[in-house]
Amino acid sequence: MAISINGQDYPLPADPRTSLLDFLRREAGLTGTKKGCDHGQCGACTVLVGGVRINSCLSLAVTHEGDEVTTIEGLGTLAAPGAMQAAFVAHDGFQCGYCTPGQICSATAMLQEIAAGWPSDATEDLDAAPALTDAEIRERMSGNLCRCGAYPNIVAAIRDVAGAEA
Amino acid sequence: MRPFDYQRAERFEHAAQLVGEDGTRLLAGGTNLIDLMKLQVETPQTLVDIGRLSLGTIAEEGDGLRIGALATNTATAVDPRVRRDYPVLARAILAGATQQLRNKATTAGNLCQRTRCYNFTNIDQPCNKREPGSGCGAIKGIARLHAVLGTSDQCIATYPGDMAVALAALDARVEISGERRSRSVRLRDFHRLPGDTPWRDNVLDAGEVITAVTLPAPVGGIQLYRKVRERSSYAFALVSVAAVIGIEENRFTRADLAFGGLAHKPWHDPRLAELLVGSEPSLALFDKAADLLLEDARGYGENDFKIPLARRTLAAVLCEATGVEP
Ligand SMILES: Cc1cc2nc3c(=O)[nH]c(=O)nc-3n(C[C@H](O)[C@H](O)[C@H](O)COP(=O)(O)OP(=O)(O)OC[C@H]3O[C@@H](n4cnc5c(N)ncnc54)[C@H](O)[C@@H]3O)c2cc1C
Ligand code: SF4
Ligand code: FES
Ligand code: FES
């Protein structure tokens, strides 16, 4: 009866109403994941479940028994930041930083999706391997809003990591 | 959110049995239901989590394809058979929501998603769909998203989804199972018009569960999904068109069209194919098709624009499919 978060087990919440987002922040004390809209409209709460990105605000924690959740805290530390975290810093991919954990989790999963050949709405040919154009990055990141409008630098940070991996 | 009893269905029969009871709702991806529970639009006493039932398979069946009720929208859109043989379906799914949402959203949950009418989602407003008999706050109110075809004086809401519009063009079927019987209905007949019972979105009876959507044998042709919205991504359709078009010797051999954003259901008018098939594509013909489609269209003020927009979007799709200069 547990959820694994960044490799550590946490007991399921007593109240089934608890969203995965509230569970992370309140019960696991992992406040890196942010609450923007609480209705699936902003992406601030994006986390990875079994490597797949989802909005944690629209998911009940009890439904994640046995799942492996990765949050921004699981992608690196201040002393040893992950590649995407370091690239966001290097490219000023934020201003206030509120949307940033969600952006970084989302971007991390997005590069895996492109590598797996998943098409997007911006993909011209559904059968070809998707190219890493700015249009593709923007469409694929459209579930993460940034009120500070740091978008150009976010795209630059993602390109940087993608280039390094390619 | 109101308190509820959480039950995880371990077997299909268990889910079907529980969902027959009053105040029970099925939970699939949760991206619509949990949203509405937070708004207290949905207040189930029991939530039956079907997320772990093995209903997620996408498999060939006969000459067609069977997409399990719990297959995620992502799994369907990236499936190589869907991309190759039913590209209009992949396109429609990819045009909807965001990657995060599509990763959780399921086939059945998508079909059963509720309207985005602002009065429906605001419990302080009157709404016949949410609270039968309370009136419709959208008629003479904020109605930008609302329907222009098949409305009633009780409700003018639209079915908001994209995937089902493509499924209507493809003439897919919905497989339904209950405790006692199983049946299959055409997707084109699955969603309802509001009439005098706007609280019923579709033909599911109490105790029935969607198990799959089945696609007929691939028909090839040119398949397009065009979605017109307020911004270029992450927004619901104002008007959308799904088209499966065949052309031989400069004549239509197939013209299966379905429309989103216009009605309480994905709109399919069989008269369009009757008009188009056998004829030579031309702007004049496309105009006639739009006349037929919109013959009984009626605006409610804020959504009047949808009528000319539907005409232009239909023409644009047919031009793209046939190469006629717009
Ligand atoms: C911000 C936002 C933007 C969106 N944009 C779009 C968009 O552009 N286009 C679009 O098409 N959609 C859009 N969506 C809607 C999204 O596609 C739906 O929320 C999703 O498809 C619902 O699937 P689910 O599995 O999460 O359903 P759930 O929320 O789990 O369930 C929805 C309904 O279906 C019922 N249900 C689930 N499974 C079954 C079953 N097997 N049998 C019978 N009933 C069942 C549930 O009881 C519930 O009533 C958007 C959603 C959000 C939050
Ligand atoms: S249009 Fe339908 S859903 Fe919207 S307020 Fe009227 S009755 Fe309710
Ligand atoms: S907080 Fe989850 S999408 Fe906004
Ligand atoms: S950095 Fe402020 S919201 Fe994105």
Image (spheres, coloured by chain):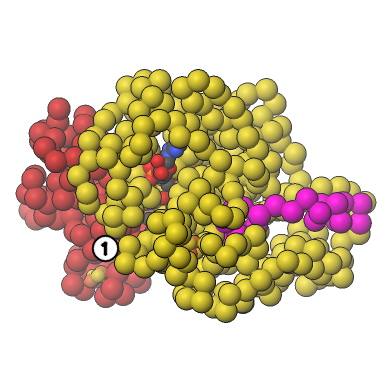
Chain colours: A red, B yellow
Q: Residue tagged by mark 1?
A: A37
Q: Image quarter for residue B14?
A: top left
How many labels sit on residues? 1
Q: Amino acid at mark 1?
A: Cys
Vertical placement of residue A47 versus A142, above or below = above
Taking the spot 36% from the left edge, 32% from the top edge, the residue there is B21
Q: Is residue B277 magenta?
A: yes
The residue furthest front is B133
Taking the spot 40% from the left edge, 20% from the top edge, the residue there is B13
Left or right of B274: which side holds B311? left
The residue furthest bottom is B301
Quadrant placement of the N terminus of chain A: top left
Left or right of B81: which side holds B40? left
Left or right of B311: which side holds A116? left
User: Can residue B104 be seen in the rendering of this structure?
Assistant: no
User: Can residue B88 be seen in the rendering of this structure?
Assistant: yes
| Span of residues in magenta | B259-279
